[in-house]
Image (cartoon, rainbow, N blue to C red):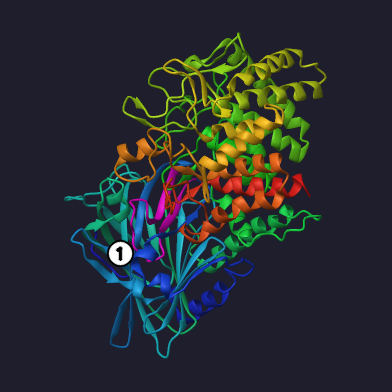
């Protein structure tokens, strides 16, 4: 490693820093503050660690951590970069150890858990307040002086900004910042051994090259002196990984030390980036980010219905910003502006099913029809054998096509897009793809997916495969196989055929072939009615048990998607059955508590958690379809809207400012899984808007 040297540039002058401070005040103007915690949360380590923040960059990268400042997951850090957007996500910058010196007093702001059981330092005790300015996390510390810290990313770049402002102090303050770095797949953990990275001084900071073929990255600050380091800090403990039965230890490299003296009102910004020439001016990038968020938030007005008696809920602007965090670039040959949807943070990539379910809420409800269009066009290029991809491996490679429903949700996403835009040009472009999809399903495609000529219903599956959204698999064990004719798959199939009839007629065709398929499938759908239990079978013609009468939430789509699949009294019975056996404040259980195999708590190691994933665990995204189905049956908008409130208000816990993937089936229904899930956020937004319009 080159000999350590200190660097200081002319931009570190007090006058320059004062100018940066004055400009930085514009960063948060115009953004609403929906989330704020005082010392009763921030100084309680358990409560503060249970609340996690997230910022994203629109290309798959992110930064995340806890309100306490500690890292409780392998995914917590200042820069998880998407090196091949939106994939190849690589953990680069772990954090900053901040030390404030006021006179002869020293105040460490960081909080770390160690494998020994120690918590040191305990900077969380110095936090006066935590808030979200839009989606930007902001901390206020009382450390012999009042210091504000905020974190954001530059949209479209693997670049994170960490800014400190000295708000109040009777004397100058010295701020020492120790940069902790890494280089690994974001699902992995580092046990460093004798690993030596190359750390080179550059203007304003250091360049870090983890190994010969690694992508270099930079930690820089235009206002501070920098001294390269190379010391491994060993045995950090990740509490959430311990609970998940995964490797919970990690080593981080102390790579550089930055020192700066601040006067009252001055600001300093640390920048972590894969970009050699990124902007170091925190004030300028902060203004760009506030403009971007303000533009997104202004779309909230589009959600308001002039004739609506209800005021817009306080959580709505926050969820509109949360929706933006999932939309990412997915460049494709011939379509460099392609878009996709990250299914959930921290660990999911983009999935076809999740993208099509979430797109209307994320893009159409928020008024960004251009984003919706790019998503739909991008996925049309990926149709293969009449099927949409299930998911894209994060490390790259060919997409996987093991799904029955992603393709069918594609029809519904396009239907909603056309209803919102009347974009006949795009519809005409997509129609031939839809025709090929229907043809492939009639003839038969992968995984024995085919139309049964006897009843017109869609069949699929076989040993060792899981094709519906209930897709947990442990080794060769498919937890919820659902081979046969699943109820929501056939509700979606009939919905797709109705869409094809409508679209064909729009382009001057009778749509006769689709009308014939539709008539037969609708007639066949009556077989789903289970008169003995007064609800729908979950799966017909299962090779192992025949017609599966297990009480699951999938039948709700037979009411929410289409008013004509079941007679009105059966629709009401479905809603009532789901309400009495599956409904919780945060979503629908995936299995009724009285059923064999019900698991009320989602916890333990990977096998235990996967076994519970669709066996009683509550899914937030299902609350939207339930509210819409309830409204269709009972014509009570206030009641339907009321179902959304507890879930929407959970933005104050777990993933702050966003909504969780799942919850325990048993009360008190603790949030679990991803802290931010695309279809949960999307379906709350979509169903709220549709309920406003349906009975306004």
- The quarter holding residue 382 reads top right
Taking the magenta stretch, the answer to whether it contains residue 642 is no
- The quarter holding residue 513 reads top right
Q: Nearer the viewer, residue 223 or 365?
A: 365
Which contiguous range is marked in magenta?
A: 60-83
Q: Nearer the viewer, residue 502 or 669?
A: 669
- Give percent across and percent down for residue 581: 51, 40
Vertical position of residue 164 compared to residue 686: above or below: below
Q: Residue at x 60, y 17 (%)?
A: 457
Taking the magenta stretch, the answer to whether it contains residue 75 is yes
Q: Which residue is mark 1?
A: 256
Disc 1 element: strand
Q: Quadrant of the N terminus?
A: bottom left
Q: Is residue 650 left or right of residue 123?
A: right
Q: Is residue 263 left or right of residue 454?
A: left
Residue 627 seen in render: yes
Q: Residue at x 65, y 45 (%)?
A: 686
Q: Is residue 628 left or right of residue 602?
A: right
- The quarter holding residue 96 reads bottom left
Vertical position of residue 453 compared to residue 387: above or below: above
- Give percent across and percent down for residue 547: 50, 19
Q: Nearer the viewer, residue 471 or 229?
A: 471
Vertical position of residue 609 compared to residue 565: above or below: below
Residue 8 seen in render: no
Q: Nearer the viewer, residue 8 or 261?
A: 261
How many neighbours does mark 1 have within 10 angstroms: few (below 14), some (14-19), or many (20 or more)?
A: many
- Give percent across and percent down for residue 136: 52, 63
Vertical position of residue 63 compared to residue 394: above or below: below
- Give percent across and percent down for residue 389: 51, 28
Tell how many labels: 1
């Amino acid at each position: 490693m080159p000999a350590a040297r200190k660097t200081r540039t002319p931009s570190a002058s007090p006058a320059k820093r004062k100018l940066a401070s004055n400009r930085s005040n514009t960063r948060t103007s115009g953004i609403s503050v929906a989330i704020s915690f005082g010392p009763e949360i921030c100084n309680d380590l358990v409560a503060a660690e249970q609340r996690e923040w997230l910022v994203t960059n629109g290309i798959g990268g992110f930064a995340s951590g806890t309100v306490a400042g500690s890292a409780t997951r392998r995914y917590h850090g200042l820069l998880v970069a998407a090196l091949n957007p939106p994939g190849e996500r690589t953990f680069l910058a772990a954090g900053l150890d901040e030390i404030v010196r006021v006179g002869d007093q020293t105040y460490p702001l960081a909080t770390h858990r160690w494998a020994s059981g120690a918590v040191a330092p305990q900077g969380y005790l110095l936090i006066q307040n935590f808030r979200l300015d839009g989606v930007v996390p902001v901390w206020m510390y009382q450390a012999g002086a009042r210091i504000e810290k905020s974190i954001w990313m530059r949209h479209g770049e693997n670049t994170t900004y960490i800014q400190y402002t000295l708000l109040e102090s009777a004397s100058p303050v010295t701020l020492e910042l120790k940069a902790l770095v890494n280089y690994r797949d974001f699902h992995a953990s580092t046990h460093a051994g004798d690993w030596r990275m190359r750390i080179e001084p550059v203007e304003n900071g250091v360049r870090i090259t983890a190994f010969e073929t690694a992508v270099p990255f930079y930690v820089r600050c235009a206002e501070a002196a920098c001294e390269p380091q190379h010391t491994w800090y060993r045995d950090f403990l990740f509490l959430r990984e311990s609970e998940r039965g995964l490797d919970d230890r990690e080593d981080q490299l102390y790579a550089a030390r930055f020192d700066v003296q601040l006067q009252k009102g001055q600001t300093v910004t640390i920048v972590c980036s894969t970009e050699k020439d990124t902007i170091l001016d925190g004030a300028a990038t902060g203004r760009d980010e506030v403009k971007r968020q303000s533009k997104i938030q202004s779309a909230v007005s589009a959600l308001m219905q002039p004739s609506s008696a209800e005021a817009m809920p306080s959580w709505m602007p926050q969820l509109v910003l949360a929706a933006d965090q999932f939309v990412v670039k997915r460049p494709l040959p011939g379509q460099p502006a392609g878009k996709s949807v990250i299914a959930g943070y921290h660990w999911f990539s983009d999935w076809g099913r999740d993208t099509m379910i979430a797109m209307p809420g994320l893009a159409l409800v928020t008024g960004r029809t251009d984003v919706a269009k790019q998503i739909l066009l991008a996925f049309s290029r990926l149709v293969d054998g009449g099927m949409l991809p299930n998911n894209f491996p994060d490390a790259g490679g060919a997409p996987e096509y093991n799904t029955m429903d992603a393709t069918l949700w594609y029809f519904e996403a396009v239907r909603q897009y056309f209803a919102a835009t009347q974009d006949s040009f795009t519809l005409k472009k997509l129609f031939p793809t839809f025709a090929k999809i229907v043809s492939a399903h009639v003839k038969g495609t992968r995984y024995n997916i085919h139309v049964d000529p006897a009843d017109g219903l869609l069949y699929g599956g076989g040993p060792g495969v899981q094709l519906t959204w209930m897709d947990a698999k442990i080794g060769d064990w498919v937890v919820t196989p659902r081979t046969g004719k699943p109820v929501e798959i056939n509700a979606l199939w009939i919905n797709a055929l109705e869409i094809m009839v409508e679209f064909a007629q729009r382009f001057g065709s009778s749509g006769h072939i689709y009308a014939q398929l539709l008539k037969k499938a609708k007639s066949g759908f009556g077989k789903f009615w289970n008169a003995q239990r007064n609800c729908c079978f979950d799966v017909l013609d299962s090779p192992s048990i025949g017609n599966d009468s297990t009480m699951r939430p999938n039948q709700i789509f037979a009411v929410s998607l289409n008013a004509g699949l079941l007679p009105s009294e059966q629709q009401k019975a479905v809603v009532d059955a789901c309400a009495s056996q599956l409904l919780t404040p945060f979503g629908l259980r995936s299995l009724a508590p009285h059923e064999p195999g019900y698991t009320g708590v989602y916890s333990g190691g990977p096998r235990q958690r996967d076994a519970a994933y669709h066996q009683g665990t509550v899914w937030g995204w299902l609350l939207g379809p339930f509210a819409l189905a309830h409204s269709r049956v009972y014509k009570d908008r206030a009641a339907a809207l009321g179902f959304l409130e507890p879930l929407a208000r959970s933005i104050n816990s777990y993933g702050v400012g966003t909504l969780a993937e799942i919850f325990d089936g048993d009360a008190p229904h603790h949030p679990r899984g991803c802290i931010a899930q695309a279809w949960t956020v999307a379906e709350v937004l979509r169903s709220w808007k549709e309920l406003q319009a349906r009975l306004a």
